[in-house]
Image: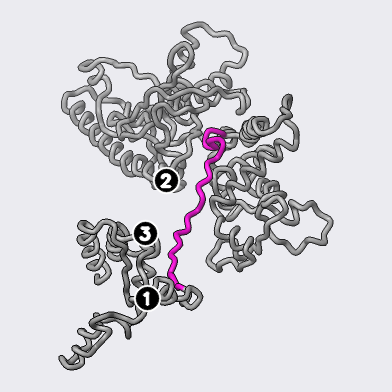
C-alpha cells in the first residue's frame, strides 16, 4: 500500500514536472519483486495494485533501500525531538542517495542471493477426448466396421503421402483398422492403467485389471501378461488383448458367435478367448446371445396363455332350446389354424369317426340305415362317463351327458316289467321324480366334474404370457416347413379375451390380414 501511495504521489507531481527524473525506493524485497514481474502471476488483490503501480511508474525506477537506512521507519519506531534534530538520515536521507547513480545501483538485491521461489501448483488432469473416425453405433457387423474404417484410414494416408493407395483393401489395412478400434476402446476405459504402465508404476488395487498383470506390446495394445510365454502358442493365445464391456467388444462377440455357427455360450467364449480377454466375458456373452435374432428364431418358444374361463352356458343349468328361441344363433368361429381351441368337440368328432369305421367297414348303406347308425353312435357318445367310475356296486353310477337329457343312459334298455301309468297323478308324480333326479345329477356334476377342473389349469402354466405387442415382427409356424423358412409377419391387432388375456392376433400379410393364435407365433423381441 505504501508503494501504491508513493506511485500516486509521483503521478500527481509529474503533472507539473513532466521531464523530471524519478527514482522510487522501498525497503520490502517482496514488494520490489512484485513490481518487477507480471501482475498476472499474483492473486487478485496484489495483481490490481501492482498493475496500477506499473501504470503510473515504470518498474525500472524502483530500487531497494535497506530498512535500517529508511527515514520513514524512524517515525514508526519512535524518536525524541533532540535526536530528531541531529538525525542526518531524517533530514538528508541515506549518504549514498546524494551520490552518483552508479554508486547506489549495488543496493538492489543480488539476484543470486534471492531465495528460490516456492509455488504451489495445482494441476487439473483431464482425459484427452478422442473422437472416433466413425460412429460405431451405426454398425452391427465387425467386418463392415473394419472395412469402412480401413477406407477412412487409407483416405487420410493418401492426403499426407505423395503415393496414393488404390484398389482392394489389404490384410495390413484391415489389421490397422482392428488395432485402431482396440486402442480406442482401451484408451476410453483404461487410460489410467495405461499411463501407470508407461510410467512403470503399479496399478491401483481397485482397478479391474489388477489381477491380470497387464502389459503394453510393441503396437501399444494392452495385453494380459501370461505365464505361458515359453509355450509354443500364438502370441494372441498366450497374451490375449484386454477389452472392456463396450460396443466394440459386442461386435467381436457377435463375430465369434457367427464363426462357431451360432453355438452356445461356451463355444463362443472359447472362440473369443483365442485372441481377446473381455472382462466378465461369460456374463457379457450371455447378455449378447440372449438378443441374437437368428438364435431367437431357431430356439424361441411359441406364445402360451392359460385357458379361457368356461362360458356360463357350459356350467349353468339352462335350457339351450329356449335360449335359441328367444335370442337366436350367433355363429362365432375359432381362430384359423387353432383346431385345439375346439378340442372338446373335435375329440367327439374323432370318436364318431372311429365308431363309423369299426361298424361300417366296407359296407354300403342307404340314407335311413346310415342315419340309424349315427343315432346309435350318438347314444353311445352321450352315455360316456364324465365322472369317476367306482368299482363298488353300492356306489352311484357315473354321470354321463344322457343323464341331463333323459335321466338315464341311452344305451340301457327299459325294464320289461315296468308299464308306465297314464293317469294325471302318476304323470305329475313321475315328473317331480324326474326333476329331483335332474337336480341330483346337476349337484353331482358340480361336485364331481366341475370342481375337478380347477386343478386342470395348474399343469399348463404359461411361460411366455403377455409378450406380444402391436407392430412386433414375429415368425409364423407353418406345418411341414422348416423353422428357418418360416415367414416373418407384423402383428396388426391383438384380440383380448373375456379375462383380458391375449390369445389371438391379426397378422399383416402381403394381400391382407390373417388371424392366428399366439401358439403359432414366436416372439423375437428381447424383453426387459
Q: Within 10 angstroms of label 1, few (less than 14), some, or many (20 or more) residues?
A: few
Q: Is residue 119 depicted above or below 393 in this figure?
A: below
Q: Is residue 491 visible?
A: yes
Residue under label 2, please give it.
458
Q: CA distance from mark 2 to mark 3?
A: 82 Å
- Of callouts 2 and 3, the N-terminal one: 3
Q: Local crowd at mark 2 within 10 Å, few (<14), some, or many (≥20)?
A: few
Q: Which residue is mark 1?
A: 99
Give whichever of discs 3 and 1 has the lower sequence position: 3
Q: Which element carries disc 3, helix, strand or loop? A: helix
Q: Secondary structure at mark 2?
A: helix
Q: In terms of secondary structure, where does tag 1 sit?
A: loop
Q: Is residue 240 left or right of residue 311?
A: right
* Residue closer to the observer: 142 or 203: 203
Which residue occupies 20% across, 60% down?
12
The picture quadrant where one finds residue 208 is bottom right
Pick the front one: 44 or 166: 44
Q: On residue 40, which mark appears?
A: 3
Whether pointer 1 and pointer 2 mark residues with C-beta atoms closer than 8 Å, the reply is no
Using the image as rendered, state which of residue 222 and residue 285 is in the foreground.
222
Q: Which residues are magenta?
A: 117-139
Figure quadrant of the C terminus: top left
Spatial CA span between label 1 and label 2: 117 Å
Q: Residue furthest top?
A: 366
Question: How far across and down, in percent of the image, does residue 144 sit?
Answer: 63, 31
Residue toward you, 147 or 502: 147
Amino acid at each position: 500500500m505504501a508503494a501504491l501511495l508513493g506511485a500516486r504521489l509521483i503521478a500527481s507531481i509529474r503533472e507539473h514536472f513532466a521531464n523530471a527524473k524519478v527514482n522510487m525506493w522501498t525497503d520490502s524485497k517482496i514488494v520490489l519483486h512484485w513490481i518487477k514481474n507480471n501482475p498476472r502471476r499474483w492473486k487478485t488483490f496484489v495483481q490490481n495494485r501492482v498493475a496500477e503501480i506499473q501504470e503510473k511508474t515504470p518498474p525500472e525506477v524502483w530500487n531497494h533501500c535497506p530498512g535500517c537506512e529508511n527515514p520513514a521507519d524512524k517515525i514508526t519506531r519512535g524518536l525524541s525531538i533532540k535526536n530528531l534534530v541531529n538525525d542526518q538520515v531524517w533530514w538528508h536521507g541515506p549518504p549514498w542517495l546524494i551520490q552518483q547513480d552508479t554508486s547506489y545501483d549495488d543496493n538492489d538485491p543480488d539476484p543470486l542471493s534471492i531465495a528460490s521461489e516456492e509455488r504451489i501448483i495445482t494441476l487439473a488432469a483431464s482425459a484427452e477426448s478422442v473422437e472416433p473416425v466413425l460412429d460405431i453405433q451405426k454398425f452391427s457387423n465387425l467386418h463392415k466396421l473394419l472395412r469402412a474404417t480401413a477406407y477412412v484410414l487409407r483416405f487420410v494416408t493418401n492426403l499426407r503421402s505423395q503415393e496414393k493407395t488404390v484398389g482392394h483393401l489389404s490384410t495390413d489395412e484391415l489389421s490397422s483398422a482392428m488395432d485402431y478400434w482396440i486402442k480406442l476402446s482401451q484408451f476410453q476405459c483404461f487410460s489410467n492403467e495405461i499411463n501407470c504402465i508407461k510410467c512403470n508404476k503399479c496399478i491401483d488395487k481397485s482397478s479391474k485389471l489388477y489381477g491380470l498383470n497387464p502389459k503394453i506390446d510393441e503396437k501399444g495394445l494392452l495385453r494380459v501378461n501370461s505365464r505361458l510365454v515359453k509355450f509354443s502358442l500364438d502370441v494372441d493365445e498366450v497374451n490375449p488383448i484386454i477389452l472392456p464391456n463396450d460396443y466394440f467388444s459386442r461386435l467381436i462377440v457377435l463375430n465369434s458367435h457367427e464363426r462357431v455357427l451360432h453355438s452356445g455360450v461356451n463355444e463362443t467364449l472359447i472362440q473369443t478367448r483365442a485372441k481377446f480377454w473381455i472382462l466378465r466375458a461369460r456374463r457379457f456373452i450371455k447378455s449378447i446371445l440372449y438378443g441374437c435374432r437368428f438364435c431367437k428364431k431357431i430356439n424361441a418358444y411359441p406364445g402360451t396363455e392359460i385357458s379361457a374361463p368356461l362360458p356360463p352356458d357350459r356350467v349353468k343349468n339352462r335350457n339351450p332350446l329356449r335360449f335359441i328361441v328367444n335370442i337366436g344363433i350367433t355363429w362365432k368361429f375359432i381362430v384359423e389354424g387353432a383346431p385345439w381351441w375346439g378340442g372338446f368337440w373335435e375329440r367327439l368328432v374323432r370318436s364318431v369317426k372311429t365308431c363309423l369305421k369299426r361298424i361300417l367297414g366296407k359296407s354300403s348303406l342307404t340314407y335311413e340305415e346310415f342315419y340309424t347308425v349315427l343315432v346309435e353312435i350318438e347314444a353311445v357318445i352321450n352315455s360316456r362317463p364324465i365322472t369317476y367310475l367306482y368299482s363298488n356296486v353300492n356306489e352311484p353310477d357315473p354321470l354321463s351327458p344322457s343323464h341331463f337329457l333323459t335321466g338315464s343312459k341311452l344305451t340301457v334298455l327299459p325294464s320289461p316289467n315296468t308299464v308306465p301309468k297314464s293317469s294325471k297323478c302318476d304323470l305329475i308324480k313321475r315328473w317331480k321324480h324326474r326333476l329331483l333326479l335332474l337336480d341330483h345329477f346337476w349337484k353331482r356334476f358340480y361336485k364331481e366334474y366341475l370342481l375337478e377342473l380347477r386343478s386342470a389349469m395348474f399343469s399348463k402354466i404359461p411361460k411366455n404370457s403377455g409378450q406380444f405387442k402391436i407392430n412386433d415382427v414375429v415368425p409364423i409356424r407353418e406345418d411341414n416347413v422348416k423353422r428357418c423358412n418360416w415367414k416373418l409377419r407384423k402383428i396388426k391387432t391383438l384380440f383380448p379375451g373375456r379375462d383380458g388375456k391375449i390369445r389371438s392376433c391379426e397378422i399383416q400379410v402381403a394381400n391382407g390380414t390373417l388371424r392366428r393364435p399366439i401358439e403359432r407365433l414366436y416372439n423375437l423381441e428381447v424383453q426387459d
